[in-house]
Image (cartoon, rainbow, N blue to C red):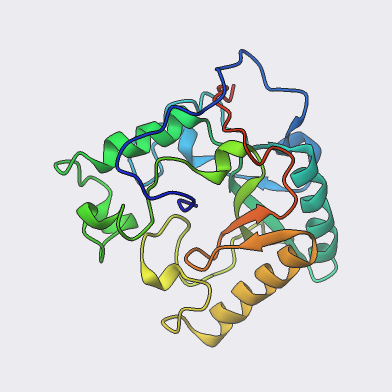
Amino acid sequence: MFRILRLALPLCLAAPALAQMPSGFVDMGKFLSDVRIEARYATAANFVGVPIDGYQAEKVLLSRQAADALLGVQIELRQVGLGLKLFDGYRPQRAVDHFLRWAQDSEDQLMKTVYYPRVDKSQLFAQGYIAGQSGHSRGSAVDLTLVSLDSGEELDMGTRWDYFDPRSAPASDEVTPQQQARRELLQITMMKHGFEPLDTEWWHFNLRDEPYPDTYFDFVIE
C-alpha cells in the first residue's frame, strides 16, 4: 500500500484537484455487481481512526484498465465459490498528505494496538509503511481480499488489512499453512490477470501496464 518513495514530507506533484471523477475511472461498486466494497478510509475504521481527507463517499474507484483486469479475477474466482472485497483503489494525494501528517504526530497512538502493535510509529517511514507518494494516487493500485460468495465473509488471511507488521508480508512464515495458501491463491490469480504484488503487503496489487504511470491525481471521491 505505502511503497514507491520513503519521504518524510509530502511532494506537491499531484495533478490539480478535479470537481468530478475523470472519464478514465470507474466506480467499482457499479462496475462489478457482486464485488464487496468496504471503503474504510471514508470512515473512522482505519489506522488513523478518523475519515481521511478526500474520501467523501464509501466508494472504490479505479482506472478502467484496472477495473477490466479485476473483472477477469472475479470471474475466475467465482468458479471456486470465491469473490473479492475491495478496501481501497484510487487514493487522492490529499489523503496521502493526511497520512503523512498523522505519521509525524507522535502523540496520536489511537489505533496502535489494532494496526501496528509491534512497530513503533516513529519507524513507519523507515520500514516503508508510509511514504510521500502512493501508487494508489495513479488510479491502478488496489487493496483487496478474498470472500466466500455464499456468506460474504472474508477468508482468514493471517492479518487484517492495513496491518503494519512483518506478518503481513505475503511470504511470512508467521501464518498458518491455510492462511499462506489463501495468500498464494490471491497472488497467483491477480498476477495472472496483469497485477503485480508487493513483498510487504498481501492485500496490495499494482496493475502492471497502468494507464497513468506518471500522474498523481487529487480529485475527491464523492
Residue found at x 28% / y 38%: 102
Q: Residue furthest top?
A: 19
Residue found at x 79% / y 57%: 74
Measured from the top left, where is residue 170 in percent x and y? 53, 72
Measured from the top left, where is residue 23 in percent x and y? 77, 23
Q: Is residue 60 above or below residue 12?
A: below
Judge whether residue 147 can be spotted in this image.
no
* Depth order, front residue of 197/157: 197
Measured from the top left, where is residue 25 in percent x and y? 73, 31
Judge whether residue 156 can be spotted in this image.
yes
Residue found at x 47% / y 70%: 169
Question: Which image quadrant for residue 39?
Answer: top right
Q: Is residue 91 above or below residue 76?
A: above
Measured from the top left, where is residue 13 in percent x and y? 49, 29
Question: Which quadrant, please, contains the C terminus?
Answer: top right
* Depth order, front residue of 118/114: 118
Q: Is residue 58 above or below residue 199?
A: above
